[in-house]
Image (cartoon, rainbow, N blue to C red):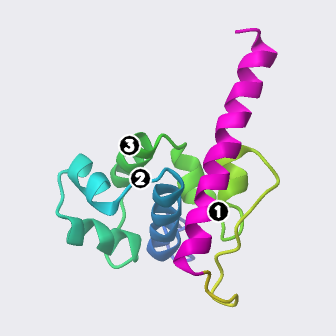
């Protein structure tokens, strides 16, 4: 998040938050149309938020976070390379910076399945530790 030096208020960075919308959505295996429907928007209007082309409000962050079952503070504060770490509380991360080579769709699909399995294992371990 950036600081507006003139007013002293924190300014939400649309591109960063939009990128986080997209990453958390993909980690939750949701399509943009599903998020758009939940928000009462057309898919094209929602994807403008993911690209940082539309102004993102706190209400928008809250609504997307509720749909994706993610803490809204994670959506605001997650930095590239730390999305997975924030979502799973594990040291694994995906570097989404533009300096790396693109991962093809098949690799992305495999990584998403691995992350889903890891999240399910973490949940099972948590239940075991809680004695449920």
Residue 90, relative to residue 24: is it above or below?
A: above
Categorize mark 3 by other alpha carbons within 10 Å: few (<14), some (14-19), many (20+): some
Q: Check if residue 32 falls in the magenta segment.
A: no
Categorize mark 1 by other alpha carbons within 10 Å: few (<14), some (14-19), many (20+): some
Residue appearing at x 78%, y 57% in the figure: 92
Mark identifier at residue 67: 3
Residue 5, relative to residue 33: is it above or below?
A: below
Of callouts 3 and 2, which one flags the residue occurring earlier in the amino acid sequence?
Answer: 2
Q: Nearer the viewer, mark 1 or mark 2?
A: 1
The residue carrying mark 1 is 111
Q: Nearer the viewer, residue 110 or 3?
A: 110
Magenta-drawn segment: 104-132
The residue carrying mark 2 is 61
In the picture provided, is 101 more to the left or to the right than 6?
right
What secondary structure is the magenta-colored segment mainly? Answer: helix
In the picture provided, is 36 more to the left or to the right than 30?
left
Q: Classify mark 3: helix, strand or loop.
A: helix
Q: Nearer the viewer, mark 3 or mark 2?
A: 3
Of callouts 1 and 3, which one flags the residue occurring earlier in the amino acid sequence?
Answer: 3
Residue appearing at x 62%, y 81% in the figure: 103
- Check contact, mark 1 vs mark 3: CB within 8 A: no
Q: Is residue 34 visible?
A: yes
- Check contact, mark 1 vs mark 2: CB within 8 A: no
Q: Is residue 3 visible?
A: no
Q: x and y percent of residue 104 in the render? A: 57, 81
Q: CA distance from mark 3 to mark 2?
A: 10 Å
Categorize mark 2 by other alpha carbons within 10 Å: few (<14), some (14-19), many (20+): some
Q: x and y percent of residue 11 in the render? A: 49, 68
Q: Nearer the viewer, mark 1 or mark 3?
A: 1
């Amino acid at each position: 998040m950036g600081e507006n030096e003139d007013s002293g208020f924190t300014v939400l960075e649309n591109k960063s938050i939009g990128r986080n919308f997209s990453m958390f959505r993909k980690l939750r295996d949701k399509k943009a149309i599903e998020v758009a429907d939940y928000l009462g928007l057309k898919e094209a209007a929602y994807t403008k938020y993911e690209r940082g082309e539309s102004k993102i409000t706190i209400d928008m962050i809250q609504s997307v976070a509720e749909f994706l079952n993610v803490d809204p503070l994670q959506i605001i504060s997650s930095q590239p390379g730390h999305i997975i770490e924030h979502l799973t509380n594990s040291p694994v991360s995906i570097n989404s910076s533009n300096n790396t080579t693109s991962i093809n769709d098949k690799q992305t699909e495999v990584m998403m399945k691995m992350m889903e399995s890891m999240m399910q294992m973490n949940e099972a371990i948590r239940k075991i530790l809680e004695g449920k």
